[in-house]
Amino acid sequence: MNILLLTDVPPCTNFTAGIVLDQLVRMLLKDGHRIACFSIMDPSLNPQISDDILGAVNYRNTQKPKESWGRHPKIGSVASLIGNNFSSTVMLPKIAREIAEFAKENSAEIIWSVVQGQTMIKVVRRAAASAEIPYTVQVWDPPEWWLSENKFDKFTKNSVMKEFGKLLHNSRACMSASWSMAEEYTKEYQARCIPVVPGLDDKSNSELTERTDQDFIIAFAGQIYALTEFNALIQALELLNWSYSGKKIKLVLYGRYFQNLHFNSPANMVIRGWVDQTEVLKELSNADLLYCPYWFSSDFEKVARLSFPSKLTSYLKTKRPVLMHAPSYSSPTRFIRENNAGYVCESLSPAEIA
């Protein structure tokens, strides 16, 4: 089959979503499918696409229209209404035509769309209709999260969510981020939903290196979205005086963004930064405990309930103990409990975490 992948993050090795797409694209290519990729990309991104993927996939990108108008400190709602409405009525039809032309050039038989935010949600049906081919949808997170983070105005939010419902209802299939998401979207939008949770090759294992230190290593990989929860962990470690069972606790962080952490001295933290997936799996395999926080706040109840953290897949791959720090209703907590796959802490109390 000739497939057009439509996404805002292309298959790559330096972004979480891109790593998952890289794996899925390789799987499809191995099965004999042909893939072209059209990326509507934020200009600030610098995806590192593997040479063999670029050699096998016809790739084109265009700039994503600005979606963060609502973050203006004084006129956010007005700016969101005007800016996003302009994008929706003027810019997106042009992008949809470009996508349709690219689909026809590559004899695409179906569009595989990865959607989040106004641009991706509103462009798919237009492009598919123009190209006269069906489409599938892949959802990582409920769009309400993206709309809230970028402070969309109420009118635009309603418009985007209305289109999201139509998008899922009319899709050939909806690849959902969790079993909970598949259940809810099937019921709410009468969509054909299939859970597609990020996975790793079960035949390859990281080679362990012998540790010479006497520390108790707690590791975290990825971006810290659940900041309140993470700061509660640090307070718990302070209560323990950064010591456990006669060992000094070392908190090792892998990823790009670790601002806004609150701690008192002395904190025994090591920030490793972004590390290639193969290497980070190797290093995580040498930790004593892997930490995965998820939101407790009611503001993020839906995303906690429906999304699934890809870092948990990486953690479980290492066969090291996992601590899931999340409310009982979250999808990763349900998964951990149903599969006896780790420890769960359902409290923000530093004392209880300790």
Image (cartoon, rainbow, N blue to C red):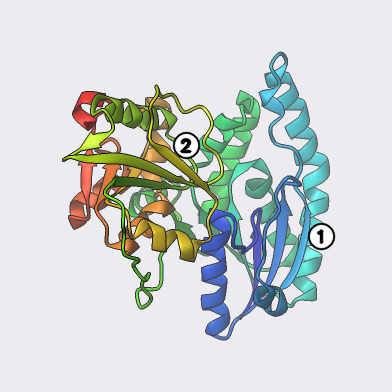
Mark 2 or mark 1: whose residue is earlier in sequence: 1
The answer to whether any part of residue 192 appears in the image is no
Residue under pointer 2? 225
Label 1 is placed on what type of residue? Glu
Mark 2 residue element: loop
Residue 34 picture location, percent across and down: 64, 80
Residue at (67, 24) in percent of width and height: 71
**Quarter assignment of residue 171:** bottom right
- Horizontally, residue 256 falls left or right of residue 51, namely left
Is the C terminus in the top left, top right, bottom left or bottom right quadrant?
Answer: top left
Label 2 is placed on what type of residue? Tyr
Residue at (32, 31) in percent of width and height: 233
Mark 1 residue element: helix
- Badge 2: few (under 14), some or many (20 or more) residues near its Cα, within 10 Å? few
Which mark, residue 98?
1
- Horizontally, residue 174 falls left or right of residue 289, namely right
Residue 341 picture location, percent across and down: 22, 55
Determine whether 205 is above or below 145 in the image.
below
